[in-house]
Amino acid sequence: MTIPSATLDLLSQQAIELPSWAFGNSGTRFKVFGQAGVPRDPFEKISDAAQVHKHTGLAPSVALHIPWDKVPSYSDLRRHAEDNGVKLGTVNSNTFQDDDYKLGSVTHSDPRIRQKAIDHHLECIDIMNETGSRDLKIWLADGTNYPGQDDMRSRQDRLHDSLSAIYERLGEHQRLVLEYKFFEPAFYHTDVPDWGTSYAQVSALGDKAVVCLDTGHHAPGTNIEFIVMQLLRLGKLGSFDFNSRFYADDDLIVGAADPFQLFRIILEVVRGGGYANPDVAFMLDQCHNIEKKVPGQIRSVLNVQEMTARALLVDRDALGAAQASGDVLAANGIVMDAFYTDVRGDLADWRESRGLPADPMSAYAASGYQQRIEQERVGGTQAGWGA
Ligand code: AOS
Ligand code: ZN
Ligand code: ZN
């Protein structure tokens, strides 16, 4: 065993929330590829997500997206989740698929449209009260395409006013989590482009408002782990949307493009007290355009677990000593030794010791679940993108 037992104990505390939209059809603006067996309703999305947890023990909750996951009875959906061994998690709002929002939602200059966007968030909070969810995650498509199109400063003020109205409605144990993204769908400016803007906005609201860091939402070369460190230091890192990017907001399998970056991010999470800390939610925000959805999510949570195990292996005492003595190469060597440690065998043993399959990917393939849903389900839904 390379992984000490204390580290294995820490690994058993890992919980990664899955996005319901990862199980529906998705694609790019060029093409949405339909797949056999995709869910026909939110209940089936939850059933699929539960398969990921069943095979990995890592994914005990599922994030919803409203209105994509609207159902007549959220208590039925909640019961269905619990019957399948998972819970309903974060509720994501959606103010980016309605003609009214072409020029903005909560930042729009027209008070009617702003109110419509605020009301949508209040509806999301009502749903959270039924699902038992803690977090309302807000990602805004708001922004402009051309210099002069609108007054950026007024939009920032309106953003604050709208978020305040939403924040007021939160229950005692609920949180508003504000995601940032530096471009797309707006291309000149977005109203929450970076962690600094998100931090400024949530700080103005209060303790129940925090920042969501989506790993795909940064310019190439950005030192994301520095942002992680800073937000943890400021007590404002509420959650992650994990995915990987080669070029932009690719939403591909986390750790696929740059496992080392994922390792560095988790290293800072551990350093900042954000690991196994319920205040820092690990979520995936991915779509599987060409690969099958359930195994795509299984691969994703395993990637996060693997990099977490490696990050937990860093010898902190030795690192501290090397840093204090100014030994640049020794300090870097300690971090790289952990990164290069192959933990896959240990993790397979650890899974077996917990009654989980040693190899979740092949166990899922052998389970017959994929064949069953491909036969039974006809007319599955699109995740929402391009819908
Ligand atoms: C959009 O780019 C953001 O990453 C959102 O978090 C998310 O992808 C969206 O809300 C899910 O559809
Ligand atoms: Zn996201
Ligand atoms: Zn995104």
Image (cartoon, grey):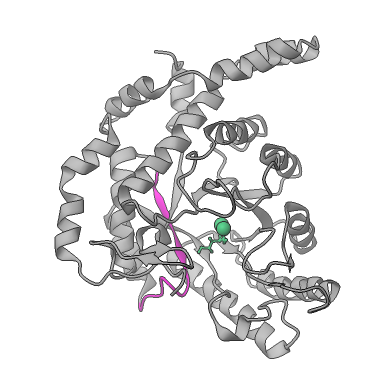
In this view of the protein, which residue sits in the foreground, 235 or 34?
Answer: 34
- Give the quarter the ligand 1 occupies: bottom right
Most common secondary structure along the magenta stretch: loop
Which span of residues is magenta-colored?
59-72
Q: Residue at x 57, y 64 (%)?
A: 136
In this view of the protein, which residue sits in the foreground, 27 or 160?
Answer: 27
Image quarter of residue 315: top right
The N terminus: image quadrant: top left
Q: Is residue 34 left or right of residue 185?
A: left
Q: Is residue 283 something one can see in this rendering?
A: yes
Image quarter of residue 170: bottom right
Question: Is residue 68 located in the magenta-colored stretch of the structure?
Answer: yes
Give the answer, above or below, for where 199 lies relative to 57: below
Total numbered labels: 0
Give the answer, above or below, for where 163 lies relative to 272: below
Q: Residue at x 64, y 79 (%)?
A: 118
Image quarter of residue 356: top left
x, y percentage for residue 340?
Answer: 51, 19
x, y percentage for residue 120?
Answer: 57, 79
The C terminus: image quadrant: bottom left
Give the answer, above or below, for where 134 lies relative to 327: below
x, y percentage for residue 93?
Answer: 55, 70
In this view of the protein, which residue sits in the foreground, 164 or 315?
Answer: 315
Q: Is residue 175 left or right of residue 342?
A: right
Question: Is residue 302 located in the magenta-colored stretch of the structure?
Answer: no
In this view of the protein, which residue sits in the foreground, 285 or 44?
Answer: 285
Q: Is residue 313 something one can see in this rendering?
A: no
x, y percentage for residue 66?
Answer: 48, 72
